[in-house]
Image (spheres, helix red, strand yellow):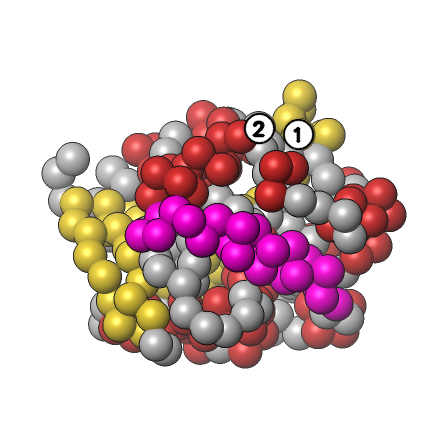
Amino acid sequence: MADFKSGYAPVDGLEIYYEIHGKGEPLVLLHGGGDTIETDFAELIPFLAPKRKVIAFERQGYGRTADIDRPFSFEQAAQDTVGLLRHLGIPKADLLGFSNGGQVALQAALRHPEAVRRLVLQSTFFNRGACDPAFWEGFKHAKPDDMPAELKRAYLKKAPDPARFPVFFYKCVKLMLDFKGWTEEEIASIQAPALVLIGDRDIVKPEHALGMSRLIAHSRLAVLPDTDHMSMPRRAGWAAPMVEAFLGAPVPQANSK
């Protein structure tokens, strides 16, 4: 592919694997829990790269980024995101996060607002009330064999040490078991406008997504039909035009309504 590069960036004790597709305004893609660049964004990148500098990377312990001796956390992942941008000489970027990647994007917008221009939040939630209790209960008894087959295959194919799969799996589970989220006041304090995207059969309740879009100023909500959580990355043909229109619109003034 033209205008493509990849490499490893030294950030906060990690060697973060990243890819850059295209040229233009920077857009960072943040993958979901248990995922890789390919599982979440293989279909979306070709739509966006012709007009933007699309930066995709794999978080601590995911894909080609080797793990280190620290837990997974949204706080650290947000710090790593901003650290990668600084390494690349990019002071500010749009962030698009799918699932857990959306939580990373929210954390980055809260802790590093100077680095975040706009947010695209796909299948993202900010508190535990967004999902049915059974969703959270399932993590208490989760085993490595419960991971969706395509995600397990992707990990085993890309990981520097595939034998660490059980360690990786339980770190992902603990991240969710420990999830506390953010208050409505914290979400309302986010200055970056957001496009909230969910599926009509997503794990995220529609009313939660609507509430989040109303809390964040100058935001939009889109509900994709015939779409559950796992199929959201396959809806790139639907999502990409909405993402482009949202990111390409003028940035609202801070005090405008």
Q: Residue at x 77, y 41 (%)?
A: 206
**Please, what secondary structure does the residue beneath circle 2 have?**
loop
Quadrant housing the N terminus: top left
Relative depth, front residue between 143 and 124: 143
| Residue corresponding to mark 2 | 231
Question: Could you tell whether 134 is left or right of 216 in the image?
Answer: right
Residue sticking out furthest to the left: 2
47 in relation to 11, above or below: above
Marks 1 and 2 in Cβ contact (< 8 Å): yes
Q: Amino acid at mark 1?
A: Asp
The quadrant where residue 219 appears:
bottom right
Q: Position of residue 171 (x, y in %)?
A: 58, 60
**Magenta residues (range):** 159-180
Q: Position of residue 183 (x, y in %)?
A: 77, 71
Q: Amino acid at mark 2?
A: Ser
| Residue corresponding to mark 1 | 228
What secondary structure prevails in the magenta region?
helix
The quadrant where residue 57 appears:
bottom left
Q: Is residue 168 magenta?
A: yes
Q: Residue at x 61, y 70 (%)?
A: 190
Q: Position of residue 45 (x, y in %)?
A: 34, 38
157 in relation to 237, above or below: below
Q: Residue at x 66, y 21 (%)?
A: 226
Q: Residue at x 60, y 43 (%)?
A: 144
Residue 121 in sight here: no
- Crowding near pointer 1: few (<14 within 10 Å), some, many (20+)? some
Residue 168 in sight here: yes
Question: Could you tell whether 208 is left or right of 220 in the image?
Answer: right
Relative depth, front residue between 141 and 222: 141
